[in-house]
Image (spheres, rainbow, N blue to C red):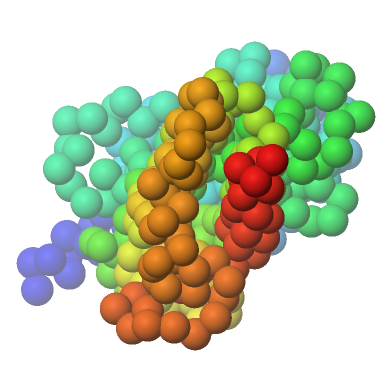
Amino acid sequence: MGVDIQGKLRIALGAVKDHASIGKAMIYSHHEGRDFSGIEVAVLRATGHDSGPIDDKHMHEILFLVSDSPGSVHFLAERISRRLGKTRDNLVALKTLSLIHRLLRGGNRCFEQQLRNAHVSGHLQMSTRCFLRNISDPSVSFIHKYAGYLEERIGWVINQAGKLEPAMSQGDLESRCYDEKSIDMVFRKLPKCQVFIDRVLDCSPSNISPSDNLVQAAMSNTLKESFQVYKTYCESVAALVNMFFDLTRAARGLACQILKRASQQSQDLQNFFENCKRIIENKNLDYPVVQIITTDHIMALEQFSTYFGSSHSSSAPPILDRITNSTKLQTTMAGIEGDEKDAGNFSWSPTLFSCSLETKISKVWVVFED
């Protein structure tokens, strides 16, 4: 009973604070002659002290007011940052971060770019330093990790096809003449995908309650975006493997480091998605099948890289014998059913490695025959 009374008091006090903040915003706006008071009031209403998710009508109101008031994006960013910086309430902080996330997903490309510019200029800040004292609290820990995810997410854009992709800097724009799966694009895009996946993995839902609507909504949006990025991630890994033997020795070394990280991430991501399936209530999430990159694949590429980088010898590199004699690697690369019964639930897409390795193995033998 004591807990219920405390919760009701918190909600009542929060409602009083919200009412006072809204009234203060209206008074100051009228006194200073500003035209953006509606935006500030909408932000305060969207991030109230109640435990419910952000009301769509407040989202639509903010987007409408911003589109109807040129030059108001920086004001919006400042008010959101102020709301997050001043609050000591976990619910308000999480709702403010969720508001940023919703705005990134709900606005048009021009608005999205303006919001990103506001972040670069310092008008939009996602600092959660005021919650450092309670970092052991699971809800506070999630707020920090969710803020870290949004710091990375704001560096991505929704393209015309509705897919997420890294925002292009001026240097990137000069490289757009390259093919999408060229060396330049793969070595730039894949590491960005890996950083994005790391931030998603940080938002572990292990301590999320099914009744925590705010965290459930935040995780649902985060997961939807992770599915899109993971598709690009897989395409970039496949492209990197396909071009592996055409790279310089230094570039192959970098490629092996990227693939080692991808190997660990693939296992972590599978566990993460399985955990989310049990905890996240949203049944409309279409989880992808995670393609596991095993250490055997990485070792094979590393040995090939070392062999090709050294002087020619009279014998084939050791990995050739492993590929020839081991049905495990052959069936994995060729996508044939074999003796891989110990693979458990892990799956592997043959398109990632099979074609390039088979072709290059044949090419090596031609060299030896010559």
Tell me if residue 343 comes above or below residue 362 in the rendering. Answer: below
Q: Is residue 42 left or right of residue 113?
A: left
Q: Position of residue 203 (x, y in %)?
A: 37, 51
Q: Residue furthest right?
A: 177
Quadrant that contains the C terminus = top right
* Residue found at x 79% / y 56%: 162
- Examine the rendering and report whether any part of residue 297 can be seen: no
Can you give x and y, in whole percent of width and height, for residue 339 in the image? 37, 82
Residue drawn at x 45%, y 60% is: 323
Is residue 67 something that shows in the picture?
Answer: yes
* Nearer to me, 357 or 313: 313
The quadrant of the picture occupied by the N terminus is bottom left
Q: Give 15 or 212, whichever is nearer the viewer.
A: 212
Q: Is residue 276 above or below residue 185?
A: below
Q: Position of residue 349 (x, y in %)?
A: 57, 68
Q: Quick one: 237 or 10, which is closer to the camera? A: 237
Number of marks in the image?
A: 0
Q: Is residue 247 above or below residue 15?
A: above
Query: What residue do we see at 37% from left, 79% from top?
Result: 340
149 or 324, nearer to the observer: 324
Identify the residue at image location x=56%, y=24%.
249
**Residue 333 on image: x %, y %:** 54, 66
Q: Is residue 211 above or below residue 51?
A: below
